[in-house]
Each structure stands twice: as C-alpha cells, then as structure tokens.
Amino acid sequence: MLATLPAATGLAAQQQDQERVVRELAFVGNKALDDLTLESAIATTNSSWWARFALVRWVGLGEKRYFSELEFRRDVVRLMLLYRQSGYMSAVVDTVVRRTPRDVYVEFRIHEGEPVRVTSLEVKGVDGIFNVEKLKGDLPLQVGDPFNRFLLQASADTIVQRLKNSGYPYAEVLRNFDSEAGALRADVELDAQPGARMRVGNVVIQGLQDVDTGTIRRVMSVRLGAPFQQDLLYLTQRDLYSMGMFSSVNVVLIDSLPPRAGSPSDSMVDVLIQLQEGPRHQTRIGFGYATVECFRLQTGWTARNFFGGARSLDLSARFTKLGGGFPSHTSVSQSGGIQYICNPFASNWTVDTMNYQLNANLRKPAFLSRTNVATLGLTAERSSQYGVYTREAVGGDAAITFNTRSAWPVTVGYYYAVGRTSASDAVYCGIFRVCDEASRHFLRDRRHFGALSISLTRDRVNNILDPTRGSLTTLTLLNASKIFGSEVPYEFNRGEFEIAKYYPVGRRTVFGWRVHAGVILPRNIDLSGQQVGYVPPDQRFYGGGPNSVRGYGLNEMGPRVYVVSDTSDTVLNVPATQRAGDKVWNGVFTAPTGGNTLIVLNAELRMPSPVLPQRMRLGLFVDAGQVWERGSEAFPISGLRVTPGAGLRFATPLGPVRIDAAYNGYPIEQGPLLYAPPDSTQGAAPPPIVQIRDAYPPTNAEKSFWQKVVIQFAIGHAF
C-alpha cells in the first residue's frame, strides 16, 4: 500500500492537470519565428477565443483545450529543437505558468541569442548543366542567412528537381556542412550527383479496357525520344485525371537500375502509366424542395468513352416548380411574366407553371491539342426569375477551352437559340416606356438569339466548397449581333468581371472579399416612335439575394415598378410599409426591372462557433452594391446600398448550409406607379396601362425594425 501511494498521488495530480483549461498561451521574446510557427510546433494549444474572452467564457461557450503537464515539459524541448534547427544554437526557453483550480495561463519566454550564419555556400557537380551563380541565387538558403536546416533541405530538393527536369531522372544531392556554434559560422556545400542524362525510351500503358491506347498517347505529355522531364510526368497524370475516365492514374519510371559508369551519356529510360478505368455509365437522381422553386427533380445519365476517343455524353433533365402555386398578382393576368410562389397544397397547379431544362452535352478532350477541351450541347428550357420574367427556348452551344494548363485558360463559345422571353407589362411600360399592346407583343414574340462569348478564368483557391486561401478571377465578354444570328431586339454587348480573394487569419478563421461588376451596351431600337436602349429581361442584371447584397430579397435591389388595379385612396395613400416584404402589399404589385449596370462588393469574416466549432461557424459580413439603368449620366455612386449582417454556417456533405441575417435601414426603393385595369371580357382588347405617379411609395413611409432585417437561406458560401 505504501508503494502504490506515490503512483496514485501522481495519477490524481495528472487528472487534475487534464481538467485545467488553457486560457492563455503567449510567447515573449521571439523575433525570428512568429507565434503561429511556434504554436504549430508544440502540443499545448490555446482554447478558442470564445473560451478565453472574460465576458463570455463564464457561459461555457467555445472549444476548450486542456493542459497536460507531461506534454508541456516536452514542449520546451520541442521549441529548443526548433530553434536549433533554425540556426539559433544558443536559444534558451523558459516558462511562466499560473495555475488556478480550473484554469492555466502559459507563457514561453524565449531568448533567441545570435544565430549561426552561413558564411559560404558552394554548389558542385552542376558545371556545364546550369549557370552556377544564378542557381545559387535561386536557392532558399543564402549566404548571410541563419543556418536553417529546413532551408538546407529545401535547397537540395530544388537542385534535384531542376536536374530531373533537365534530363537526369536519378539525380541526387549530398549535403555537407561545417558548423561552428562558438564562432557563429557555417560553411555549406551541396554536392550534386546528376547521373546519366536520359531520354524517354518507351511508354508502357497498363490497365486499359475500353479506352484505346492511341487516345492516351494523344493526351500524355511524355514523348518518345524527348529528354526526360519530371514535371511532364505530373502533367500527364493531371491531364489523364481531367478526362473523367479514370478512377486511378499513376505515372512513374519503370523500376530499373540507373545506368552504370561508362554507359552512353544519352541513355533511355522507360515510363509506366498505370490506369484504372471508372464505371462506363453513371446514373444520378436528386429531389428537393425550395420556397420559390417548390418541389424539384433532377436526373442525369453519363456515358464515358462514347464512340471512343474518351468522349463523354451527358444527358440531364431538371424540373422545378412541381406543385401547386398561386400567382403573385392576379389583377394583371395579361402579363406573360407572372410568377408563382410555391404552395404545394393549392389545387390550381398546372403544367404551364412548371420550369424545366433538358440538356445533351458531348465533351471531347485533347481537341486539336492535348491541352484543349471541346464541348457541344443541345438544350430546351423553360426558366424564370421570380417576379421578373419567363424564358422559353430551344437551342445549342459549342465551346472550346484553350490551354487548360495555363494560369488563364480561355474559353470561346457560341450560343444559338430560338425562343421568347415574357415579362410583366409593368416592366415594359415602367422601364422602357413601352405601354402600348403592339410594342409589348413585339418584344414578347419569338426571336433568334445568337451570341459569341469569350471568358477567362484564373482559379487559385485551395477548396472549391470552402476556400480558405487563394483567389478566383473571371472575365466574360459577350456579343449578340446580326453577325452571329441575333435578331432585333436581341442585339447588345455585355461584360462581367468578378474577383474573390481569401486570407487565413489564424488557424481556422478566414477573411474574404469579392468585387462583381457588369455593364451592358444595348442597341437602340425604334418602339412606339421613340428610341429605346432595349435589353431583354433575361439578359439584364439583377441584385439582391443570398449570393449578392444580402440586405435585399432575391432580385429586389435596383429599379422597380409598382402596379395597382385599384386607385382608391385606401390603396394609394396608406403607408406602403405595412407589409413591405411581400410581392403584393396593400393591393400594390411590385416588379423588379433590373438594369444594365451592376456592382456588388462583399466582405466577410468566417470564424469557428463557440458551440460545436467543428460543425458550425459564424460569419460577419458587409455587403454593398446597386443595380442601375444607365443612361447618358455617369455612375450614380451615391446610390450604393450598404447592408451589414451576421450568420451561421453548418458543415454538411453538400457544403456549408448558410443562414444570414442582414440589416437594411434604407427606405423602400421608389419607382413609377402604374395603373393596370382589371381584365376585360373575353375577346376584348387588353386595357391600356397608364402611369399615375412618377415616384412611389411616399417618401415619409417608415419600416419597422423587423422589416429592416432580411433573412437569407442558402447552400454554399455567398462567394
């Protein structure tokens, strides 16, 4: 019993340490190495901000990290070893620990001392292959730097990689150094052993079943008889993966002994490409529900290696607005752009309220060149934007992406369709002043639409679903004119630019920003005896929504018109803000008209949540933007709308599910008020639409606090 007592006492003390929460972890005196590097090298970690901040930690929020006495003692050794490997041989690490019954506060006090510095750096064995002085200037370790062993290894790896890309697949580099800690100097020598220079002799392809070897040889970058380059093996692997045909790709040298001394200076080396084909056919199906699209169904079928050549054929179908609905405004039924809000229990659902999209796409990799990809598609669609327009069209497109390996791959595409776009009479009359039925019928008539587009994309984000660093830049230019088969009024030029950047802040916090801008140059057409710069509703810019300025509902930012079928004082003079969040309020129907100029600015900070930090994150954001109908005047920058907000992000297999609440303190956007009489009897001419006010609602109308808070639901980040 006496023998086991010390062990039991030690175990109790260890359990007590495990219960202590690390409330503070600090480093003092470090200059050569930053706090983040030091934190990454030790086992003791700081609790999250929510568990450290005095005003909120008493609630028990935040991720708590517990203190281990054993790991803490090892951390001192870890830090000293890190400093020695970084060239600071005389570094001393001391600690100050303040313990309470439940908490612990840790401080590492570091005296770095003077580092051992590189006094000479020699590179041998590469004379006649590289410019030695230039090579030395490109190495991570330089003369005068602290003698960092990690940079020494990186310098050796740099030389090896350059030799392998210059035809020496079996190159090695020996690292030699003479370090004197007392004299604070180190002499470094990197002795390269290039081996024999080699060319690609044979490429062996294994694992093919349906795909022919000729297709693989057209795609691969490794060429018979060419000097060996290690990077070409990586490029070949990436290009084969991008074909979408294989579940596994491995490109390596065939195991063999390096050439012996005395062999020819130009020997041959063989390359092995090991492939495992994926399933030949794939079927997918999905089902969902949304407040605007109601029940929706999508399905698809993909055939890989379609008629050989690694082509892929994809057939897909998507149906939305499956279910009952009620019109957002019943008194203007002659407008072809009436939209329906989802109401699955309504009995008036008909097929003509359903949206659909049918697609057939054929993809051909290595088109004309191993780095080009060509696509050809056919489509039939009936699509709509809630409260804005309905588009019905049948057409097709063709596109070629040039140089997919470059930092800026260029895609040139051509789209041609025959269809019609229907919008509310209020849109035509309010924004274009086209109020007569003949002109509105002309704009709704079926038209040919042909356009040539050019887009550039630079994708440098580290995660497509949840980026934490990098940037994404896109530029798209489109021309629709008679040259490409467009008819009046589908003739215009359109340009869009978008850039988003992400910066890690600490370990799990990310700051990101985005700029999205667009402009349309319309062609003036003659309608009702006046020149109108017309842009079809489906090609205009719209703002507001979960992926735009979140202080506005979907498509509700920017120009709009108001329509009434009752001109009584009850409708026109009662403050219109009593139900400002609805499409129909106080008998007034509002319709977004969009614009030909758009700018959206977003900034967002994403951080771990104090509750379930592994599955939930917080977001603080500020959105700004506006949609304008640009005339001869300059950009009205004073019209920008700024809406701050906060939200939650839940991690799911589909990506983050997002709930945002944004504050919009601005009054309701004003627009012209139109009078649309109720429908006449069947067979009679449609009644005329008349503008009765230039600006509506009244400027003295105010919103309640809850009307100023806009809730947005979405899957995926806003940008």
Image (cartoon, rainbow, N blue to C red):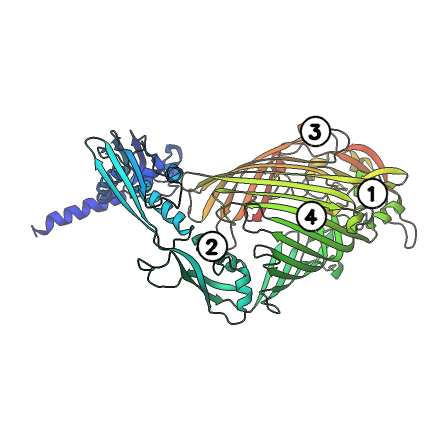
Residue picked out by circle 1: 565
Q: Position of residue 29 (x, y in %)?
A: 29, 29
Q: Amino acid at mark 1?
A: Ser
Which residue position is annotated with label 4?
453
Residue under pointer 2: 232
Quadrant of residue 54 within the rendered picture: top left
Precedes in sequence: disc 3 or disc 2: 2
**For residue 265, what is the image quadrant?**
bottom left
- How far, Cα to Cα, is label 3 from label 2? 52 Å
Callout 2: helix, strand or loop?
A: helix
Type of amino acid under label 2: Leu
What is the residue that sits farthest to the bottom in this orientation? 209
- Are there few (<14), some (14-19), or many (20+) residues within 10 Å of tag 4? some
Q: How far separated are the C-alphas under marks 3 and 1?
A: 33 Å
**Of callouts 4 and 2, the N-terminal one:** 2
- Residue occupied by mark 3: 636
- The amino acid marked with disc number 3 is Pro
Pointers 3 and 2 in contact (C-beta within 8 Å): no
